[in-house]
Image (cartoon, rainbow, N blue to C red):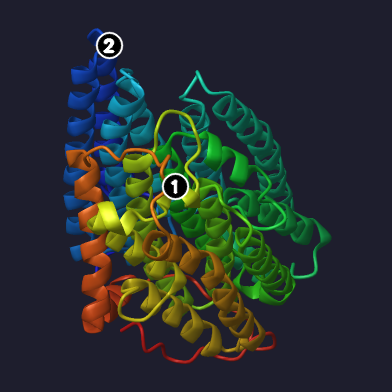
């Protein structure tokens, strides 16, 4: 296994090769997007080239992952945790671009720069996944957030879109202030912003009870809590998801969440592993509140995008269970869960794009009798709802995703039994709205005033079929699912003191 000394500039550049390639490609596409006159054909061409850039970057990431390089102390990570997070981010970016090409045609958007904004946001996400320094974390969050603020308000003809974008911007700026102030306090307590150095100085100087450090950790928790839409920092999510264009809503619900959780998990385990007892109860409280509130409020939603917004909040709670486990097994389970959730989310929004008409919100009643006129759409939506529910076999990879999170919680050195019980109970609650969507498609007649469903556009059909096939494939062949979870093994620095935590057990999910 190669060890990279990231103090050498050339090696630091080598660690950032996929990110630099992606960013340079995005800037080149930006110049081409603004060079030519706006038209539907031009925005499609930019969208297709953007997908090509993502595929090329994905190949570079996989090549780097095959090299098995590990950076131990530098500001940029070169480990499987980063590469697997990048894979999920790039797959989500491809999904958002593909859906965006068709959705732009549907709503009459000819601005090609929309695709470039997605690329720039994803470049910030990749930087987040690689960050081993709090300042790089901040830069990644800002690059991601500024682009997503603009994406949320793309539909300038919609009042709901403007309202959602304004709320997102104001609350996002507020949460960023918490994040930055937390970084400042942690720097004041330890004299460094590097995750490895923070851990080393906390141990060397016995800073575990430092008020400055603990307040800084609490502020970081608030900042990350907003980015992952955990309760009580979730207030922005329903309105923003409802008002944003459909592809952007899917992108925020899945891909933005992936990047935020990747940074969240790395910071917590690498920098604050010895502070486990200080932050653990807070994370447990956030996880329980998020699982309960997200699923309970989701039961009464009939607007399909708001239903999926509260579903996204609930899934953030499920993923927080893996964070609370505080182990590398939890990290692998988290990445696998994010992959499964991303597939189901983009598939569900592909169907929403097909059925949406104008700016009117799509409701569950609009799905009534879908089985009788478009059976393949109904079957695909069933797969996506069952995957989010975690139903065995027909829910495919969704079942194994929740199973791995449960296993990570119960096999942690400090078993998270309470969180496991709450996860199971709230999953049962979520069946109330996931199965309701399936029920109206198969058991209710088509309304006389129901909207006509146009043919499925090519790129949207590609996303829908690819997502459903991948979900079912992993459901039928669980051995391959286990292998993918093993690929997600991260080289995280978990060094708790013997007084606070027992030695971790070997993980069955990782080699």
Q: Which residue is mark 2?
A: 38
482 w.r.t. 186: above or below: below
Considering every residue shown, the one lying at the far front of the view is 448
Picture residue at 21% right of the left edge, 64% below the top: 469
> Residue 237 location in percent, x, y?
60, 46
- Residue hosting label 1: 366
Residue at 32 percent across and 47 percent down: it is: 350
Q: Position of residue 322 (x, y in %)?
A: 53, 73
Local secondary structure at mark 1: helix
Left or right: residue 128 versus residue 113 is: right
SS class of the residue under badge 2? loop
Q: Residue 157 in the image: x percent, y percent?
A: 50, 18
Q: Nearer the viewer, mark 1 or mark 2?
A: 1
Q: Is residue 55 toward the left or the right of residue 362 in the image?
A: left
Above or below residue 312? Residue 140 is: above
Foreground residue among 387 and 406: 387
Residue 315 in view here:
yes
């Amino acid at each position: 296994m190669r060890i990279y000394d990231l103090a050498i500039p050339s090696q630091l550049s080598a660690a950032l090769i996929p990110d630099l390639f992606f960013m340079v490609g995005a800037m080149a596409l930006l110049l081409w997007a603004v060079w030519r006159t706006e038209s539907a054909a031009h925005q499609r061409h930019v969208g297709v080239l953007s997908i090509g850039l993502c595929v090329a970057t994905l190949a570079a990431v996989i090549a780097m992952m095959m090299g098995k390089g590990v950076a131990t102390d530098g500001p940029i990570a070169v480990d499987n945790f980063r590469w697997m997070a990048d894979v999920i981010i790039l797959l989500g970016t491809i999904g958002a671009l593909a859906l965006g090409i068709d959705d732009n045609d549907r709503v009459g958007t000819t601005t090609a720069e929309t695709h470039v904004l997605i690329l720039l946001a994803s470049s910030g996400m990749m930087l987040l996944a690689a960050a081993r320094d709090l300042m790089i974390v901040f830069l990644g969050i800002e690059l991601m957030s500024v682009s997503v603020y603009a994406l949320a308000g793309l539909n300038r003809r919609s009042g709901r879109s403007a309202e959602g974008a304004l709320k997102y911007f104001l609350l996002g700026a507020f949460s960023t202030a918490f994040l930055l102030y937390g970084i400042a306090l942690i720097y004041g307590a330890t004299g460094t912003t590097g995750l490895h150095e923070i851990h080393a100085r906390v141990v060397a100087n016995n800073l575990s009870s430092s008020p400055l450090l603990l307040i800084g950790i609490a502020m970081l928790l608030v900042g990350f809590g907003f980015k992952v839409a955990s309760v009580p920092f979730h207030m922005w999510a329903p309105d923003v998801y409802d008002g944003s264009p459909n592809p952007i809503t899917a992108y925020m619900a899945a891909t933005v969440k992936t990047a935020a959780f990747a940074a969240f998990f790395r910071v917590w385990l690498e920098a604050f592993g010895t502070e486990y007892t200080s932050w653990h109860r807070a994370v447990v409280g956030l996880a329980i509140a998020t699982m309960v509130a997200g699923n309970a409020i989701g039961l009464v939603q009939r607007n399909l995008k708001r239903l999926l917004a509260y579903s996204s909040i609930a899934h953030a709670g499920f993923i927080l269970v893996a964070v609370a486990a505080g182990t590398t097994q939890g990290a692998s389970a988290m990445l696998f869960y994010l992959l499964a959730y991303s597939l189901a989310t983009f598939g569900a929004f592909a169907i929403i794009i097909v059925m949406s008409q104008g700016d009117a919100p799509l409701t569950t009643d609009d799905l009534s009798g879908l089985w009788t006129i478009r059976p393949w759409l109904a079957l695909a939506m069933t797969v996506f709802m069952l995957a989010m529910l975690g139903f065995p076999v027909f829910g495919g990879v969704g079942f194994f995703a929740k199973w791995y999170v449960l296993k990570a919680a119960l096999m942690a050195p400090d078993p998270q039994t309470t969180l496991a019980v709450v996860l199971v109970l709230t999953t049962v609650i979520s069946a109330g709205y996931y199965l309701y969507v399936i029920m109206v498609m198969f058991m209710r007649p088509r309304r006389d005033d129901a909207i006509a469903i146009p043919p499925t556009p090519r790129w949207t059909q590609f996303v829908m079929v690819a997502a459903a096939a991948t979900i079912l494939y992993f459901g039928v062949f669980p051995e391959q699912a286990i292998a993918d979870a093993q690929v997600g093994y991260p080289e995280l620095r978990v060094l708790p003191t013997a007084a606070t935590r027992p030695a971790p057990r070997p993980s069955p999910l990782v080699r």
